[in-house]
Amino acid sequence: MSTQYCGLVSQTDLGRIVSLCGWVARRRDHGGVIFIDLRDREGVVQVVCDPDHLAHFEIAESVRNEYCVQVRGAVRARPAGSENAELASGQIEVLCESLTILNPSSPPPFLLDDDSLSENTRLTHRVFDLRRPRMQHNLRLRHRVVMEARRYLDQAGFIEIETPVLTKSTPEGARDYLVPSRVHPGSFFALPQSPQLFKQMLMVAGFDRYYQITKCFRDEDLRADRQPEFTQIDCEMSFLNENEIRALFEAMVSTLFKNVLGVRLNEPFPVLRYSEALHRFGTDKPDLRIKLELTELSDAVKDVDFKVFSGPANQTGGRVAALRIPQGGALSRGEIDGYTEFVRLYGAQGLAWVKVIDSAKRREGLQSPIVKNLHDAALAAILERTGAQNGDLIFFGADRAKVVNHSLGALRLKIGQSEFSVAHGLCETGWQPLWVIDFPMFEYDEETARWSACHHPFTSPKDEHLEQLESDPGRCLAKAYDLVLNGWELGGGSVRIHREDVQREVFSAMNISADEAQQKFGFLLNALQYGAPPHGGIAFGLDRIVAMMVGADSIRDVIAFPKTQRAQCLLTQAPSQVDERQLRELHLRVRQ
Amino acid sequence: MSTQYCGLVSQTDLGRIVSLCGWVARRRDHGGVIFIDLRDREGVVQVVCDPDHLAHFEIAESVRNEYCVQVRGAVRARPAGSENAELASGQIEVLCESLTILNPSSPPPFLLDDDSLSENTRLTHRVFDLRRPRMQHNLRLRHRVVMEARRYLDQAGFIEIETPVLTKSTPEGARDYLVPSRVHPGSFFALPQSPQLFKQMLMVAGFDRYYQITKCFRDEDLRADRQPEFTQIDCEMSFLNENEIRALFEAMVSTLFKNVLGVRLNEPFPVLRYSEALHRFGTDKPDLRIKLELTELSDAVKDVDFKVFSGPANQTGGRVAALRIPQGGALSRGEIDGYTEFVRLYGAQGLAWVKVIDSAKRREGLQSPIVKNLHDAALAAILERTGAQNGDLIFFGADRAKVVNHSLGALRLKIGQSEFSVAHGLCETGWQPLWVIDFPMFEYDEETARWSACHHPFTSPKDEHLEQLESDPGRCLAKAYDLVLNGWELGGGSVRIHREDVQREVFSAMNISADEAQQKFGFLLNALQYGAPPHGGIAFGLDRIVAMMVGADSIRDVIAFPKTQRAQCLLTQAPSQVDERQLRELHLRVRQ
C-alpha cells in the first residue's frame, strides 16, 4: 500500500511518484489549498492537496487530525522560503494526486504535543499516547538496546535459554505473585522473581554460558521506578572468576552505549569496595558525577564536649562525618534550614554546619553554632581533612553509621543536583559508571534477630572468609558486584556457591534449618552434588538502562503498557473481577 | 580457568599447552595409565594421565564419572591406530600435567547414554538429563533459530516490543491462568493466551511492524505436544495485504531452514484453500509428503441401494469419499480390520473397502463386501475418479462431512506413515510446507447454539463477505492463513478487523451483546476509533518449529524445564502448597 515511510521521503525522491500511508498530524487550509502533515513512525512529510491536481478535493476537505490515510503523488521541491530544516523531509513536499481515507478518527482525547497531561490520562489512552514521537523513540531505542545486547552475548558464546514462568514459590526476598493450579487443588505456581536458580542449574547442566532477556515479577508496593513486571538481561557463566565476569559485562555495557547512543564510556570502570563507597559517598551506588565526598571524623571528635559528636564517635556502629561544599558559604540560612529539614527525612536529628570565612584565623574565622563546643585539635582535623578553603561550607552528620550514610549520602545527591552545584561546577555531565564490589555476605535483621543475605543466599563468600561463616557472619564479604551508573544500579551479580557443603553452611548461618533448606531448595542442593562447576552471573535492569539512555523520569516511559503505582493497567482495566465459575475451577473462594 | 572448549581442541593445537574445564564422561584404567574422556558443551577430548607425567597421579585415580575437573597439559597426536574419526578431537589427546578436581560428583542417577529412561526419571533429574549431548544440541539449535528469526525480523524493520504478562482475563477460547491481586481484593490478572490485542493496539499506535518472541499461557488439559506455557514468534504489521504478509513470512521460514539446517524449502509454498484441503486431505493441515488423496463421491452415490452411502450423500452436511491406496491390495484382512478399528476412534461407524483385482472386468474384478449394493454407474465413477489400478485398495468414508474428513484424514496419515507406505513409495522424505487460506469466519457450536470464531473474533472477513456477516455467517470466509509443514501447523494468522463498525458486527454475529463487548473488549473498540490502520499478523509456535527441526517426538525435548502432562515440574515440585499468610494477603481461601 505504500512505497516508503513518510518520514524518509527526501530529495533523492524528487520527481518520483510515491504512495504513502500514515496519520494526519496537522491540516491547514491556505487560500484554497490544503496542507497535510502526514506522520508515520519515521517522521512527517508535507502533502499538498491542490484542487487543480486532486480530483476528489472534497476528501481532503473532510480529513481531520489522526485520520489514517493513503496518499499518492509526486515528490517536488518546496517553494523557496518554505523549507523546514528541522525535518528530514523538510526540503520536499508531495503533490497529492489521490487521497484515500483508510480509517477516520474520532476527535483525539488530547493533542500529541500536549506536555501537560497527567500520567493517568496518558495511561488511560495509552494507545494514543504511544503515537507521540517521544514514546516511539523510546520504544525503538529499547529495541536497539536489546538487539545490541543479544548480538554481543551471542558473539561471546552465550546461549539464550528460556526458563519457566510458572514456577515454585520460595518466599525469600520480595513477595511472589501466585498462580493457582486447577489440576492440583490448593497448590500454586509462583511467577519468578528472577530465573536465579534455573540459570544456576543450567550451569550445572553444562551449558557454560546462558542468557535470557526476560520478565521478572515482584508483588511489592510500587515506587516511581518499580513495576510489578520488569525485564532483566540475565546472564550466567561457568569457569570464570569475578574479574573475568566483570570485564565481559563492562565491555557489554560499553558496547551498548557506543552502538546505541554513540557514547564512549571511560574504560576500565573504576572499582570501589562497598566499605569505601559508604565511607566516601554514604551509599553503595554513588553518583560519581557529583564532586562532593564525605570525610571521616569519628576518631577526631571522640573527646569533644559536644555530645552530639562525641556520643556517636564513641559508640560501636556510630559515625561522625563531614560533607564539604566548596563555595557553600554562599548558601543562605534559609537554604541551610531547608537542608536540615531534608536530612530529617533520612533519620538525622539535625544538621550541624560550619562556614569557613577565613581559615587562617582558625576558630575566629569560622561561623557556626557548634565551634564553641569543639576543641582546637578537632577543628584543625576538620579543616585539614576536608581540605576546606575560605568560602566553603561544611555539613556534619553524627549518628549511627547507617543514619549518617543515609542522610549525608542523600544530602550530597540533593546538593549535587541543585542549581548551586551546577553554577559552581560541582556536578559534571555525561556518564560515570563504576563497579562496587566486596559487599557483605549478610546483614543483621533486628526485627527477626537473624542474618539475612545482602545479595541472595546463593552468593559465594570470599574464599578467605569461608571459615567465618559460622563464627562471625557479619565479617564475611561476598564475591558480589554491582554496576552503578550516575547513581543508579544498572546491574548486579555475584560468583555463586558451587559446593553443596558451603551452600548448606550459608543456609545455616541464616538460621534456615536443614529441613527447610531441603524443602525450599532441595532441587538446588541436589543439583550441586553432581559436579557443579564454579559459576557466576549478573542481571541488568533493562527498563532502567533504557530509561537512563533516553533521559526518561520513569521506567513507565520505556514500557509500552505499564501498570500504575497501584499495580493497575488503566487501558485494559486489569486486574478485574472474574467469573465465579473460574474461581470454582481453581478451588478458590474470595475472602469477604 | 580454561584456554578453550574441550570439544574444540584439534590438530591445530598440537604441541600447545592447554587448560580445559569439563566433566568426566568416562574413565578407563589401561595398564597403569588413566584415560579420561573430558566433556563440555562442545564435545569430548581424551586426556591421558600417565604417572610419569602427572605428579599427583592419585587425583586421577580418585576421579569418577561426572566429576567437574580442570586439566592442564600438552596436546599431542594420538598413537597411530587409536584415532577416533567420530570425534572432532579424535586425532589428538591431552597429556595431563596437572589435574584439579573442581567439584566431585555423587554417583549419577543414570548414564547419559541410557536411552531407555522413562520421561519421569528424566524430568525428575532434569539438570542431569540436560547434560546429554542430544539435549545440548536441541537447546543450542533453538537458540540459533531464535537468533535467525530476530535477525530476519530486525532487518525487515520489525521492532521488538514487550507486552504485559499480567493482563486482563477475557474468557474466550482456552482457559486463562489467573493471578490474584493483593492490592485489589477479589480481582485477578490473567496470563496472556497470546499478545493478540496488545499487538493490534501497537499497530493503532503506529509502530507499523512489531514482533516479540514471548511466552503464552493456556490452562488446558495437556496433550503430547502442549505445555501450559509455550513460546510464540508473534508478529503484526500495518498497511500490508494478506499476500504481502504471507510472502514476508514464507521468506522468514525459508531463511530459518536454510541458515539453521542448511535446507532449501521449495518456494513459493503451495497455497490451498481450506475447503480444498478438507476435500483432498480431510484436514486443514495436510502432510503433503504423503501421496494419498481423498476422492469426492457424494454426488455419485446418491441413489445407490447401500444406505450407508446414500444416506450421507443425500443429507445436508453429509459426505461420501474414497481414499485410494495404490497397491493396497497387498494389505491383509487383519490389517484392514485394524484400520477399521482405528477410524472408529475418529467417530466412523465402519470402513468400507474395495480391492481392485482386475478393473477391466468391472464388478467381477472387484473384491469387496459392498459392491453388490452399488450400481454400475457408481462403481464406474469410483474407479474412474480415484484412478484405481489393478492391485489397489479403496477405502470409503460416509457420514457427516466432519466425521468423514476426520476419519479418512487420520487414516491417510496412519497409512502414509506405515511401513507399507514407505515400501511402496507413498511417502516422501524432506520438508513440504504449504499455506492454507480462506478459512471460514465462524463455526456453529451445537452445544451453545452460537456461532464462534474459527480463528479469533478479531479476524477480518473477506471484503466480499462483509455483507453476509449478519444474514449468513456460516458462508463468510476470513482473511486467515496457516503455515503447515509436514502435517503440523507451524504458524497461523490473519488480516485483522481495523474498522470499529465491522468489529461490532462480528461480535454481534457471535451473539456477544454490545454490553458484553464493551466490558471485555472496550479498550480495543475504543482504540479502533482513532484511525486504526489496516493491519494483520501471524504467530509461530517456536517449540513446534524447533521440535520438528531436531526430529524430537515431543516439544518437551526442546524446552529446558518443561511441565509434565499433569502440569507439574518434577524438578522443583511446582505447583506446591503456599503459606496461609500468602493466601490471606491475596484475600483467598482454598475450597475444601
Image (cartoon, coloured by chain):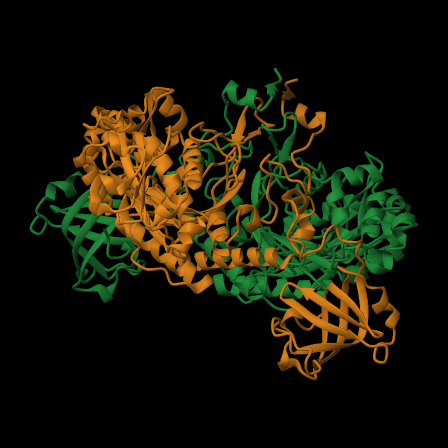
Chain colours: A orange, B green
Residue nearest the observer in this picture, A303 or A212? A303
Query: Does residue B106 appear in the picture of this structure?
Result: no
B35 shown above or below B9? above
Residue B387 sits in which quadrant?
A: bottom right
The image shows residue B310 at horizontal and vertical percentages of 89, 46
Question: In the visual, does A331 lie left or right of B262?
Answer: left
The quadrant in which the C terminus of chain B is found is: top right
The image shows residue B494 at horizontal and vertical percentages of 72, 55
Query: Does residue B146 appear in the picture of this structure?
Result: yes
Question: In the visual, does A545 lie left or right of A505?
Answer: right
Q: How many numbered dots are placed on residues in this image?
A: 0
The image shows residue B410 at horizontal and vertical percentages of 68, 47
Residue B254 sits in which quadrant?
A: bottom right
Q: Residue at x 38, y 20 (%)?
A: A447
Residue nearest the observer in this picture, B137 or A589? A589
Question: In the visual, does B73 lie left or right of B202?
Answer: left
Residue nearest the observer in this picture, B363 or A443? A443
Question: In the visual, does B38 lie left or right of B546?
Answer: left
A255 shown above or below A396? below
Residue nearest the observer in this picture, B569 or B265? B569
Q: Residue at x 19, y 40 (%)?
A: A380
Residue A441 sits in which quadrant?
A: top left
The image shows residue A368 at horizontal and vertical percentages of 31, 37
